[in-house]
Amino acid sequence: MNVLLSISGLSLVELCLIGAAAVLLILWIILLVVVISQKRRVNELNDRITMFCQGADGASLENDILDMFDENQEIRERLDQCEDRIQNLYWRMRSTIQKVGVIKYDAFANMGGMLSYAIALLDENNNGMILNCVHSVDSCYTYTKIVTDGRADVELGAEEAKALKMALDNFHPNGRAESGITQNRANDRGPAETEHNGKH
């Protein structure tokens, strides 16, 4: 009751000042709590960053990042070199023998064993040669015919034409090329041997 009487004896201005001071005090306390809390969080974050930036050997994260950039640049340079080398190898491979066809046959009626053969050797652009090796009883002759864009410069014999067709047909640039030699060996075995191997 005495407090109320003493408060009632104050003027309106004094009461407003006391209320404003009380509000400011409360706001200051709240701000102090917030600052302390944020300070604690900042300290925790700094501790985490410090631990993260220091490796087992004490190297800083900045140095590690710079090293990674240098390694990345080196990898790109080596990749460019590899691409140039691959392109160079590709152009070199275009002129190498990539397509092969072999046909074995008996050149003479009095000879067996299919010792004679015609072999077609072509590059990626179907340029190359056909070798026709003819075996007789006492001699062996080899004939060469040039192939350009898949066509021979002179007329081909039956076996030579088959060898050329085999080389052109058995090449698969995006897959596994079927070997003309393997196919020809399978044809040479005959149906009985093929059926016998198929049972195994």
Image (cartoon, helix red, strand yellow):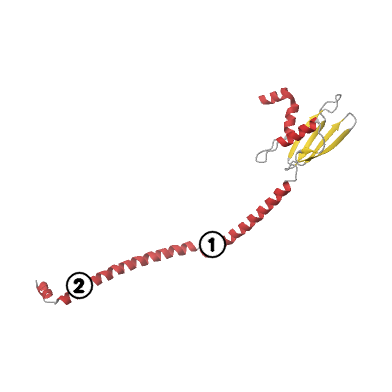
Q: Is mark 2 on a helix, strand or loop?
A: helix
- For this view, does 141 lie left or right of residue 80? right
On the image, the x and y values in percent for residue 17 come to 20, 75
**Location of residue 135 by image quarter:** top right
Which circle's residue, 1 or 2, is located before the other in the chain?
Answer: 2
On the image, the x and y values in percent for residue 182 come to 73, 33
Give the camera-side residue of 152 and 130. Answer: 152
Q: Quadrant of the C terminus?
A: top right
Q: Is residue 60 visible?
A: no
Amino acid type at mark 2: Gly
Between disc 1 and disc 2, the foreground one is: 2
On the image, the x and y values in percent for residue 90 come to 70, 48
On the image, the x and y values in percent for residue 163 come to 77, 33
Q: Residue furthest top?
A: 192
For disc 2, the marked residue is 19
Give the camera-side residue of 15 and 130. Answer: 130
